[in-house]
Amino acid sequence: MPGLIGKKIGMTSVFSADGKNVPCTVIEVGPCVVTQVKTVETDGYEALQLGFEEQKEKHLTKPELGHFEKAGVAPKRHLAEFKGFTSDYKLGDSISVDFFSESDFVDIVGTSKGKGFQGVVKRHGFGGVGQATHGQHNRLRAPGSVGACSYPAKVFKGMRMAGQTGNKRVTVQNLQVVKVIPEHNLLMIKGSIPGSKGSIVLIEK
């Protein structure tokens, strides 16, 4: 799907036409620069590689510098590929937030907030074992049984247990574009999106 790279700014709320208070996420979208045009003849598929945010040359390797020099653009910090663009873009072309319009529906891809090592109550929503009183003191948030004893005498793969929570690639689908502010490269999306403030997200039509 065609889309752009953006940065999550934070959340706010706006009033709709019928007077409802709508929670929105503010995203700084683009401008994104075309750094590579992939074609069926050369790469086996059609796609556009877009770059977002300026990057100092000292932080790049020589192959990366050569890649940007070939495209004739300044070095970029973030790169992503998108398929399905209907318009013909060339190397160095800039795509701004005007690519989206109000009432569009988009998918947002981001990295969720990392929570560290968490127990089963927070990680999977377990209700806990037994009662909180009547002599019980150390089993309330325990996971309980994790498998049979005699047969098959093992714990099956996929058993929900304590472990690393968050910090994963998450896609939220069918979010509505509430407002486009082209003079500030801002996009207001209805609802929340994964990631912390300042995190990079992909906005796909």
Image (spheres, rainbow, N blue to C red):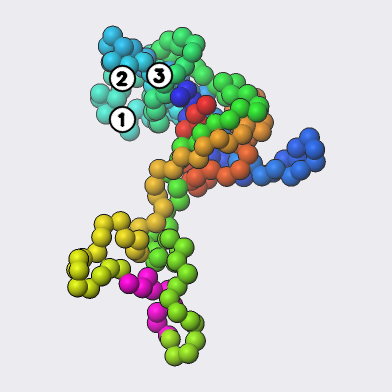
Q: Which residue is mark 1?
A: 60
- Kind of element beneath mark 3: strand
**Label 3 crowd (10 A; few <14 / some 14-19 / many >=20):** many
Up-down relation of residue 79 to residue 37 (above or below): below
The residue stretch that appears in magenta: 137-145
User: Could you say which is closer to the camera, residue 205 or residue 69?
Assistant: 205
Q: Report the quarter where the N terminus lies.
A: top left
Q: Quadrant of residue 64?
A: top left
Nearer to us: label 3 or label 2: 3
Q: How many marks?
A: 3
Residue at 42% from the left image edge and 85% from the top image edge: 137
**Label 1 crowd (10 A; few <14 / some 14-19 / many >=20):** some
Give the image location of residue 204, x and y in percent.
Answer: 49, 29
Q: Label for residue 48? A: 3
Kindly report the distance in space between the C-alpha atoms of the residues bearing marks 3 and 2: 14 Å
| Magenta span: chief secondary structure | loop
**Label 2 crowd (10 A; few <14 / some 14-19 / many >=20):** some
- Kind of element beneath mark 2: helix
**Callout 2 amino acid:** His
**Callout 3 amino acid:** Leu
